[in-house]
Image (spheres, helix red, strand yellow):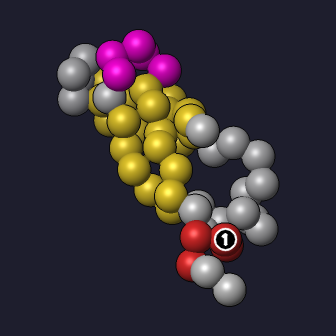
Amino acid sequence: MARTDIRPIVKLRSTAGTGYTYITRKSRRNDPERMVLRKYDPIIRRHVDFREER
């Protein structure tokens, strides 16, 4: 079984519209829907929601 099958690499893009992204891995078994995390966006210097992009 390939490593990417269970824990694929996903991009988290800022909802503030700055275009800033984080790269991370997620578990398909635990989180089958798109992930949303509140992280720091250094362009606008605030914490905003980052949504998974496919």
Amino acid type for the residue under numbered disc 1: Asp
Left or right? Give the position of 29 relative to 8: right
**Residue at the location (47% across, 39% down)?**
12
> Residue 17 in magenta?
yes
**In the displayed image of the protein, which residue is found farthest to the front?**
2
Badge 1 is on which residue?
Answer: 5
Quadrant for the C terminus in the image: top right
Front one among 16 and 24 = 24
Q: Residue at x 32, y 28 (%)?
A: 20
Of 39 and 13, the residue lying toward us: 13
Label 1, secondary structure: give it.
helix
| Image x and y of residue 27, in percent | 65, 66
The tally of labels here is: 1
**Which percent across, then down, holds residue 11?**
47, 43
Q: Is residue 26 above or below residue 19?
A: below
Asked if residue 49 is positioned above or below residue 28 in the image, the reply reads above
Kindly indicate the quadrant of the structure image that contains residue 29.
Answer: bottom right
Q: Is residue 37 left or right of residue 21?
A: right
Residue 18: image location, x then y, percent = 33, 16
Near mark 1 (Cα within 10 A), the count class, few <14, some 14-19 or many ≥20, is few
Secondary structure mostly seen in magenta is loop
Q: Which image quadrant for residue 3?
A: bottom right
Q: Is residue 33 visible?
A: yes
Q: Looking at this view, name the residue that lies furthest to the top.
A: 17
Instruction: Look at 73% across and 57% down and name the residue there.
Output: 31
Q: Which residue shows up at 76% across the image and 46% down it?
A: 33
Residue 36 visible here: no
Q: Which residues are magenta?
A: 15-19
Q: Quadrant of the N terminus?
A: bottom right
